[in-house]
Amino acid sequence: MDFNSAKISDVYLAARQYGSSGRTATKGTPFQDGFLSTSTVGEADNVGTKSETASKSYTYASSNASGDVADAGDASKNPLVYSLKMLKSNSSGITKQSGASDATSLVNQKTNSVSVLAPFIQLDSTNSTSHGGANVYPDDIASPAAAAKMIKDLKAVGGGTLRIQMTHDQVNDSQEMKKLEALVDEGDRRGVKVQFTYRADAHRGGATVLTDDKLKQAADDISKVIKSYGKHSSFVLDTFNEGGGAGRATQDWADMQTTLIKSARRAGYKGSIAVEDVNWAGGQTAGPESGLLKYAAQLKAANGKGNPRLIGSIHEYANDTGASVRLGNEIDSLMNAGYKVQIGEVGNARWIGNNQFEERDGAIKAVKDNLATLRKIGVDILPWRDQFQNNVIRHNTGFSKGDQYY
């Protein structure tokens, strides 16, 4: 293979075929140094709500009149939070469920050593120092000063991307937008990407296809955001959180994504755009119900010539014994289709209603089984905010070095 002229997908596939070391799973979770210690939250079978007084002692506030604060380093050693709500949510109820069986994964039959190709693999080298990150909601951030500190803390623990979901109401709330402005300003200074993700109001922000007036509203909102912040070097657009009713790749889904992509490009946006596969992918990206694959030509046409290639984003929550193999196949499929790959969310906590979660470790194992390959090709891996650590649910994952996969 001529590595100077090879397609990215060719180099990637060669990387997966070279070498002799198989993928291996590492036992346990990637969380070692909690942002809030378990002693702060309580034991798994005895989690109670912290008192208002105790909570306030951990609430973030800027350290001086200018609003600037010192770098925090590993946030686990400096357990500040960014809003009272973020702290109080760490006391929510939990349910423990055993994960998938640890049957020997077929993925171990594949190899992932790319040392022979290391000089040639320079895939998406921008922001190459870190491909980790975190996920947050605007309600997790108390103020613009807290937003700036959040970026500093994420950078200090090795995170390179902060993904934030915002609804129509939040996009049109000046106070919420000041938080976004503070994030991208600090992101510019720190070299941290801020991935703005448009979110629906219904269905907990997912499993939705926007049409008619709702789609026009979303396109207008994205255009507004782009015109305000799209020229920031830190800004990345994520068109829509977990879109796609019933998990099927429909023409309506493709038309929604096309409209949102075109809205950003028509507003003058020249940066990267992430498109999440149908209903967060859920293991479907390698199969016939992948919108990213089924409608790849339509989405690429909407993206336009001369712009960065689209980011194909999947969310990893699978808990079955085939999750590891399927994730490897998903990566292959997206790379072959010409996408840059991102795992926009990965977690071990499944929401079961009434602010209750159950622990499922299959997705963590799937990512770890594929981790050598994910690292070699520079896949962004963004842990979801809700995670179990030592049988205790946390709602601010991503701000400790132990939360990162890189």
Image (cartoon, helix red, strand yellow):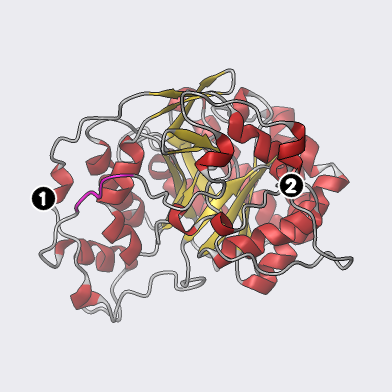
Placement of 236 over or under 82, stated as above or below:
below
Q: What numbered label is drawn on residue 109?
A: 1
Task: Mark yes or no: residue 227 visible.
Answer: no
Quadrant of the snapshot with the N terminus: bottom left
Residue 180 in sight from this viewpoint: yes
**Image location (x, y in percent) of residue 388:** 45, 37
- What kind of secondary structure does the magenta stretch mostly adopt? loop
- The vertical placement of 216 against 381, above or below, is above
Q: Residue at x 46, y 72 (%)?
A: 128
Q: Residue sitting at 66 percent across and 39 percent down?
A: 87
Residue 344's disc number: none
Which residue in the protein does label 2 denote?
59
Q: Amino acid at mark 2?
A: Thr
Task: Work out which quarter of the rendered image holds the C terminus and state it.
Answer: bottom left
Determine which quarter of the picture holds residue 91.
top right
Report x, y in % for residue 31.
42, 49
Residue placed most toward the observer, 301 or 18:
18
| Snapshot quadrant of residue 229 | bottom right
What residue range appears in magenta? 24-28
Q: Amino acid at mark 1?
A: Gln
